C-alpha cells in the first residue's frame, strides 16, 4: 500500500520531460550536433532517457539530412526507438511547413504511441504553418482509429478554444486523457512569457476537461522563462534542439542531453522530479 501511494504521489507531482531533438527547421551544416541519422537519433534517445526524458518528439531526415516524412523511414525509426529505449515515441504530424497534408496524415501509418496534432494555423516566422479545421479533424479521427494518443500543439491561445470545439464535436481521443503542449515564442504565435503561460493555463482550465495536463516549451531565448513558469504552474516540460540552439548567451547548445539534464535539474529543484516512462504512460493514458 505504502508503495502504491508513493507511486501515485510521484505521478501527481512529477514532471513529464519530452525531448524534441531534431525538428525540421535547422540544417545539419549550421548545427552539426543535430541528430539526423537513425543512429544519432537512437543514441540521443538512450542518453536522454537515462537523464530523465520519458517522451521523444520525432522529426526525421533523409540521407542528405533534409526533413522527410518517408513512411518506411518513419516505421524503421519507431521500431528502433522501441527496441533500444522505453521512451514514448511521439511522431510529428507537423513536419516542415512545406509538407502536404496527405504526407502528414500518412505519418500515422507508422503507428507511433503518440503523435502531435496542431490546433490551428499560425504564422511561423516568414512562413505559414497551415492547419485547416478539416485536416485537424482528420488527424484526430485517424489517431483514434489507430489507437494513437495525441499531443495537441497549442501555438496560440485561440488554439485551446479550437481544441474544446474539436472534443465537443468529435469526442475524446484514444485513452481518454487530454494532454496539450504550449509551443511559445514562435514569431507569429503566442509570446514565451510567464503572463501568457498563465493565461493559456487559465483557458485550459476553463475550456477543457478536468484532468487535462499541459507541457510547455519556449522557442529560442524564451526557453528559460517558459520552463521555470511551467514548473511553477504545475505544468510539464518539452526541451530539445528543435526549439533551442543557444544554451546561454554566446554559448551554443552542445547536445540534446545538455538540455534534458538542465530541465531535469530544474524539475528536481522544484521538488517535481522527472517521471519515469511507466509513470508517464499512466499519466498520458498510453497502454503499451
Ligand atoms: N516544424 C513545424 C512546422 C509538430 O511537430 O507537430 C511544426 C512542428 C509541430 O514542429
Ligand atoms: Zn515538431
Image (spheres, rainbow, N blue to C red):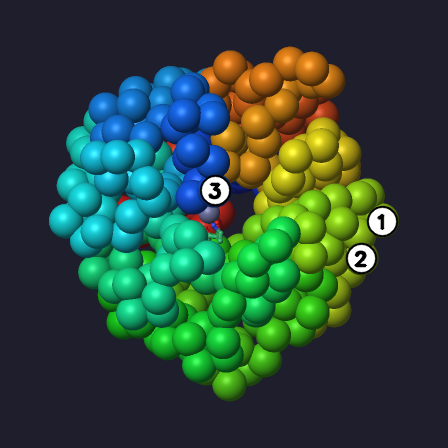
How far across and how far down the image is residue 25, in percent? 47, 42
Name the residue located 26 percent from the left edge and 35 percent from the top edge: 64
Find out whether the residues at labels 2 and 1 contact each other: C-beta distance under 8 Å.
yes
Give the labeled residue for mark 1.
195
Ligand 1 neighbours mark 3 (CB distance < 8 Å):
yes
Disc 2 to disc 1, how far (Cα)?
6 Å
Circle 2 or circle 3, nearest the eye: 3
Name the residue located 38 percent from the left edge and 18 percent from the top edge: 47
How far across and how far down the image is residue 86, in percent? 30, 32
Give the labeled residue for mark 2.
199
Under tag 1, what secondary structure? helix
Name the residue located 39 percent from the left edge and 53 percent from the top edge: 95
Give the labeled residue for mark 3.
25
Under tag 3, what secondary structure? loop
Q: How many discs appear? A: 3
Q: Residues within 10 Å of mark 3 (few under 14, many from 20)?
A: few
Q: Residues within 10 Å of mark 1 (few under 14, many from 20)?
A: few
Badge number at residue 14:
none
**Between disc 2 and disc 3, whose residue precedes?**
3
Circle 3 or circle 1, nearest the eye: 3
Q: Is residue 182 visible?
A: no
Name the residue located 76 percent from the left edge and 34 percent from the top edge: 225
Q: Residues within 10 Å of mark 2 (few under 14, many from 20)?
A: few
Disc 2 to disc 3, how far (Cα)?
28 Å
178 vs 213: above or below:
below
Amino acid at each position: 500500500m505504502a508503495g502504491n501511494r508513493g507511486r501515485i504521489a510521484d505521478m501527481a507531482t512529477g514532471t513529464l520531460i519530452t525531448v524534441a531533438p531534431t525538428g525540421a527547421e535547422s540544417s545539419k551544416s549550421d548545427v552539426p550536433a543535430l541528430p539526423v541519422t537513425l543512429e544519432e537519433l537512437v543514441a540521443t534517445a538512450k542518453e536522454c532517457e537515462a537523464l530523465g526524458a520519458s517522451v521523444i518528439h520525432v522529426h526525421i531526415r533523409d540521407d542528405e539530412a533534409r526533413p522527410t516524412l518517408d513512411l518506411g523511414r518513419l516505421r524503421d525509426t519507431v521500431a528502433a526507438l522501441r527496441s533500444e529505449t522505453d521512451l514514448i515515441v511521439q511522431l510529428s504530424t507537423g513536419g516542415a511547413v512545406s509538407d502536404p497534408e496527405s504526407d502528414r496524415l500518412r505519418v500515422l501509418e507508422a503507428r507511433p504511441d503518440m503523435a502531435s496534432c496542431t490546433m490551428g494555423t499560425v504564422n511561423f516566422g516568414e512562413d505559414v504553418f497551415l492547419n485547416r479545421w478539416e485536416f485537424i479533424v482528420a488527424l484526430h479521427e485517424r489517431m483514434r482509429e489507430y489507437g494513437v494518443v495525441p499531443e495537441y500543439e497549442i501555438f496560440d491561445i485561440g488554439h485551446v478554444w479550437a481544441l474544446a470545439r474539436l472534443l465537443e464535436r468529435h469526442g475524446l481521443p484514444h485513452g481518454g486523457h487530454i494532454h496539450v503542449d504550449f509551443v511559445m515564442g514562435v514569431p507569429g504565435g503566442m509570446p514565451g512569457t510567464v503572463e501568457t503561460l498563465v493565461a493559456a493555463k487559465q483557458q485550459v482550465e476553463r475550456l477543457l476537461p478536468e484532468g487535462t495536463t499541459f507541457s510547455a516549451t519556449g522557442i529560442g531565448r524564451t526557453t528559460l522563462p517558459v520552463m521555470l513558469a511551467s514548473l511553477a504552474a504545475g505544468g510539464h516540460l518539452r526541451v530539445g534542439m528543435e526549439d533551442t540552439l543557444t544554451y546561454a548567451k554566446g554559448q551554443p547548445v552542445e547536445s540534446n542531453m545538455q538540455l534534458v539534464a538542465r530541465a531535469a535539474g530544474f524539475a528536481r529543484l522544484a521538488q517535481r522530479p522527472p517521471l519515469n516512462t511507466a509513470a508517464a504512460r499512466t499519466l498520458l493514458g498510453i497502454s503499451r
